């Protein structure tokens, strides 16, 4: 199973605090630490492009608890243009889908609401 699959499964099992994006990020960070998944937090890809998490191997994880689908997609498109990024995972409670590839890099969505159902 890829890092994307493993992380999506870990997130699916936990109820993550959705009241504030920083709290959501802290909960996700705790899950990554507990699972011994190596990552960097708030990784600067370029001036103005800072992804929430960059997992070893280049999986960029972006957390969104709000915002328009168009602006979220534009942000992911920018991140996927960087060499350090090999795949994208959007972790969000915004109901949206992504194409399977963004700039030639695998893309997936993990719904934060799944564990609350």
Image (tube, grey):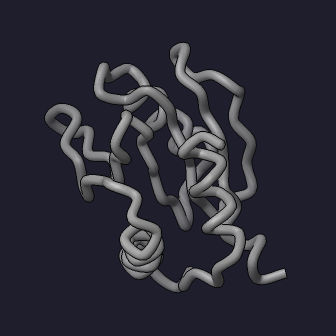
User: Which residue is outermost to the top?
Assistant: 104
- Quadrant assignment, res 2: top right
Position of 102 with respect to 117 (left or right) is left
Quick one: 75 or 2, which is closer to the camera?
A: 2
The quarter of the picture where the N terminus appears is: top right
The quarter of the picture where the C terminus appears is: bottom right
Quick one: 56 or 101, which is closer to the camera?
A: 56
Q: Residue at x 31, y 54 (%)?
A: 39
Q: How many marks?
A: 0
Q: Residue at x 25, y 53 (%)?
A: 40
94 shown above or below 74: below
Q: Residue at x 77, y 83 (%)?
A: 116
Position of 116 with respect to 103 (left or right) is right
Q: Position of residue 101 (x, y in %)?
A: 63, 22
Q: Position of residue 100 (x, y in %)?
A: 70, 26
- Quadrant assignment, res 60: top left
Position of 100 with respect to 89 (left or right) is right
Q: Position of residue 10 (x, y in %)?
A: 62, 67
42 shown above or below 45: below
Q: Position of residue 38 (x, y in %)?
A: 33, 55
116 shown above or below 73: below
């Amino acid at each position: 199973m890829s890092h994307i699959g493993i992380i999506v499964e870990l997130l699916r099992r936990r109820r993550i605090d959705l009241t504030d994006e920083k709290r959501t990020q802290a909960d996700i960070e705790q899950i990554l630490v507990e699972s011994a998944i190596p990552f960097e937090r708030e990784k600067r890809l370029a001036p103005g492009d800072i992804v929430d998490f960059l997992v070893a191997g280049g999986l960029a994880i972006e957390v969104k608890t709000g915002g328009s689908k168009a602006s979220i997609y534009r942000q992911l498109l920018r991140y996927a243009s960087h060499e350090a990024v090999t795949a994208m995972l959007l972790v969000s409670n915004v109901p949206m889908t992504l194409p399977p590839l963004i700039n030639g890099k695998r893309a997936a969505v993990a719904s934060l609401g799944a564990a609350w159902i």
